[in-house]
Amino acid sequence: MISKFGLSLLILLSFLVITDGQWGPPEFDFGPGPGFGPGFGPGFGPHPPWGRRRGWRRRFCFRHPDHPRCWGMPPPDFGMQPPPDWGMEEPWDQQQQPQTPPQPAPVPAPAPPPPRPIPAPAPPPIRRPPPPPVRIPAPAPPPRRAPAPAPPPRPPPPAIPSPPLTAVPHGPPAPLARFVRDIKFGRLDATPRQALINSCTSRRINCRQQLSSATQKRSSILASELLIQRKFNPRLQNGIIEGRLNRVQQVKQQLLATSGLGTNIVPQNDGTFEEDTLLTDTQSIGLLNSLRSRNRKKRSGIYAEGFPTQIWPKQRSIPYAFDVSVLPANQNIVRNALREIETKTCIRFQYFSRKPSQNHIYYTKISSSTFCGLSYVGRVSPANPIYLSFSCPDFTGVVIHETLHALGVIHQHLRSDRDESVRMEWSNINPLFYDHFAIADAKMFTTYGVPYDYYSIMHYRAYAAAIDSNKPTITPLSQTARFLPILGQRTKLSDRDIELLNAMYCTSDGKSSLFYYYKIKNLKTTVRDLQAKIKSS
């Protein structure tokens, strides 16, 4: 039998069990803390540590919700408030929630954005059968044309281009044009051509050899030109002078080819033209163009008085200077020659102890046994070097001869009207020196209306370049015995030499241009008559 005390104890335990089941762990869950079971806040076991004094705990935790002992209690704003009788131990009803005193409204959290609707997948495309291909008929091929005939091969370009010319007249005056057609620079008739060929084929002369004297002469000229020209242009290269001498050789080769002798004769490559004259690049190109222009029109040639032979300014003194190689005794020879020119013409020379800045004549000495003197023809920029050996007889006349070349005067026997006064003995002329006897280009050199002169200091001697030195190569047609020994004199200026210089430098009446082709085909007239013919035409 159970006593009353035991029965009371049993009832009390049953009540506690029922009560503990009602006030057990809360239905909310804050998530498991580290090391704790599910359904409890961090740091608490399955039962609260305060025993059964839940009323006091609820009141304390309502005021101090952040206290560590209140972590297991529901928050005040969770939606469940304690009943108004705070001292009651009975559990409060969760369905009847009393009004709580006003509390500051919590800041609502920003609402999450609405979820984006997932687009429905696009329906698969409907596959349609491809349209049948449209066939375009191919265009008919064009009719085949007959192949064009191949163009004729172009002639090879000249080795040296012609320099551009501006403001150059296209021909001589109209009344003289009919005489120009008879001037055939570089042309040779059949009889003299055959005479030269016979000299080669008969083995009298080896027409393809280069004489040692010619090789020595070229080497001497090349060295002297480099030495002197570099005094005017220190940056001058060796190839400039070498190319200039090569062009002179090209002129000689073209001269033989134009004369019909190119396959029989090789000219002497001595660096000179007509034995004692040097050519500028412009002069060489002008001569080459004239020799190659056999098919040009009559009035298409260059017609400019003094071109490319340039004369010095009129009514002005011509400057000159000496190289250090010219000794005082040799300087006196040069001064005597210039004085001869000054006393008989209007030309004046002015000496400069140092090289002047303007164009001038520059006398220099060259030690050579192959020639007496060398000069360019006409004014040359920046200076006209005249090379003198001072080793030939009558050297004053040699200086006059070379100085006249520098003034623009050519050899007398190369005039275009020379066949009316002298005869070339072609059978006795050495073919290797054909350029010494070829008529000069009448478009480059003019006679200024002065007749042919046997006494001219610019004439060759009668036995020049002879195969047989006992026979002449140039024979005067008038009074042969009288004038034969006169040809090539180097003593003084002749009267017609003086007349020629005065016509070039001392007159301004236009005589030189009117008599540009004086005495071509026995043209004999005066300036007034020729002017009248030009006006009447």
Image (cartoon, grey):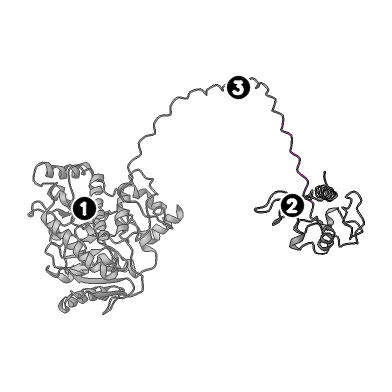
Q: Secondary structure at mark 3?
A: loop
Q: Could you tell me the amino acid type at mark 2? A: Phe
Whether residue 106 appears in this view of the structure is no
Q: CA distance from mark 1 to mark 2?
A: 128 Å
Mark found first going from the N terminus, 1 or 2: 2
Residue 227 lies, in percent from the top left, at: 22, 68
Mark found first going from the N terminus, 3 or 1: 3
Mark found first going from the N terminus, 2 or 3: 2
Give above or below for 233 relative to 164.
Answer: below
Name the mark on residue 136.
Answer: 3
Q: Main secondary structure of the magenta part?
A: loop
Left or right position of 286 against 63: left
Name the mark on residue 126.
Answer: none
Front one among 465 and 517: 465
Quarter of the picture holding the N terminus: top right
Instruction: Please tell me whether mark 2 or mark 3 is closer to you in this view.
Output: 2
Residue 176 lies, in percent from the top left, at: 37, 52
Q: Could you tell me the amino acid type at mark 3? A: Ile
Instruction: Please tell me whether mark 3 or mark 1 is closer to you in this view.
Output: 3
Q: Are marks 3 and 1 in contact (CB under 8 Å)?
A: no
Identify the residue at the far front of this view: 1
Whether residue 252 appears in this view of the structure is yes
Pointer 2 residue: 30
**What is the span of residues highlighted in magenta in the rendered image?**
111-122
Q: Quadrant of residue 109?
A: bottom right
Give above or below for 124 relative to 157.
Answer: above
> What residue is at 28 percent from the left and 78 percent from the top?
352
